[in-house]
Image (cartoon, helix red, strand yellow):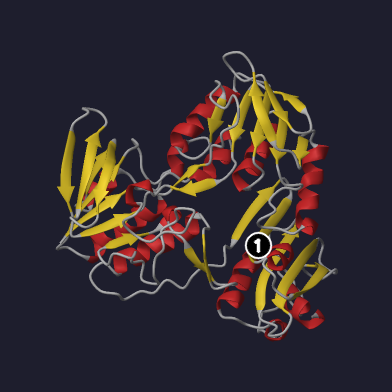
Amino acid sequence: MKVIVIGCTHAGTAAIVNAANLYKDINITVYERNDNISFLSCGIALHVADVVKDPQGLFYSSPEALADLGVTTKMKHDVLDVNVKEKKVTIKNLETNETFEDTFDKLIVTTGSWPIQPPIEGIEKENIVLCKNYDHAKVIIEKAKQVENITVVGAGYIGVELVEAFEMLGKNVTLIDAQDRILPKYLDPEFTAPAQKSFEDKGVTLALGQCVSRFEGQEAVERVVTDKGTYDTDLVVLCIGFKPNTGLLKGQIDMLPSGAIVIDEYMHTSHPDVFAAGDSCAVIYNPTGENAYIPLATNAVRMGTIVAKNLKKDTARYMGTQGTSGIKIYNHNIASTGLTELTAKEKGLDVEVVLIKENWRPEFMPTYSEVTFKVVYNKTSRIVLGAQLISDEDLTQSINTMSVVIQNKMTIDELAYVDFFFQPHYNKPWNFLNVAGLNA
């Protein structure tokens, strides 16, 4: 069986490594347009801030490692066309400009996503950069050394992490977003307000609730103009969001209007011999049961692994996702899973919430700190739909527990009596997850 894989970051690497280990009778060829594979883009901000000094630590595989598994990896090879019906692809060698065709029995599409670049006047000016891959990281780090004023456009996870990184480097930082607060997709206001205050205390300019109208300057950007103000800048990093990179298959397999590929629970697309995984796909979002576009590395590695399991026969089922995620902003440890109160209400769901502030371990211990914890649940069925927490203590693993609660459709009442251990070093006789259930 001849397998072609297009793209090799999180999902692609997981699919390739697992398939190579599972089956010794298949031929795997990988086509990757970049000169590196398996880059952990979530580590870019850590590298920018010099927390991660050696960027090689942000790669968890290599063409050499794949070759040791018997995989043919073609770097700097851009797939120009895919013909699903005829099972062939057209590829261009970016080093020699040679164009050639290859054929497949099974195709794995792990083409990922690409940053959104809206048609803003002046966006083509120098020193306006994207943040997605290793090449972007190198450009950002090099340019940041030469400037003092940096503007980040987009207050999602990557944008917020970059703002902290630039501030730690002593730069004058402005964060612009059309929403009136940071991280609105993942957190309710009770959880974003403390982080925003920390940014303001550090001197970061928060230009929230503002839309960028244009970028001004001569050759390079000098000012960002919004509908509410003007901000001098030497460097702009665009972190507006991502879109699925699926143009090669448009009109050949089923997609959402966004371009995200629709897959079944065994990772098949609408063509039985074409699999897809990672940021190019829609996923089943368990809190609502709908197809949703949630580009997270955790989703990607799970999906890639399941593709490998199902190459010959459907054996492993994708269980969907809760969109579980976490972030550290200065001393704030924040995590969330499932629906927030605001997103649930935007979807027209009838929900109740319980919000507690609790010391995470007994007050007789030498130190303890407060955790703010919120659970969103269906008012009628009382099934848990989402949870969020913030604390100076790292309690973020508790959100993984809440992810399992949502996955298994547990109720808020069941959460009250779940068996959790007690040890004064780690918690109270009533774990704060239980307390939320009891209060509800």
Q: In the figure, is residue 395 to the left or right of 205?
A: left
Provide residue 56's location: percent of width, then percent of height. Answer: 43, 38
Q: Residue at x 21, y 43 (%)?
A: 90
Q: Quadrant of the C terminus?
A: bottom right
Is residue 168 among the parts visible in the rendering? no
Provide residue 258's location: percent of width, then percent of height. Answer: 49, 53
Provide residue 197's location: percent of width, then percent of height. Answer: 82, 45
- Total marks placed: 1
Provide residue 319's location: percent of width, then percent of height. Answer: 46, 73
Is residue 305 among the parts visible in the rendering? yes
Q: Amino acid at mark 1?
A: Ser
Residue at image mark 1: 336
Q: Residue at x 24, y 66 (%)?
A: 22
Q: Secondary structure at mark 1?
A: strand
Q: In the figure, is residue 329 to the left or right of 325?
A: right
230 vs 419: above or below: above
247 vs 381: above or below: above
Q: In the figure, is residue 34 to the left or right of 365?
A: left
Q: In the figure, is residue 302 to the left or right of 89?
A: right
Q: Residue at x 18, y 55 (%)?
A: 86
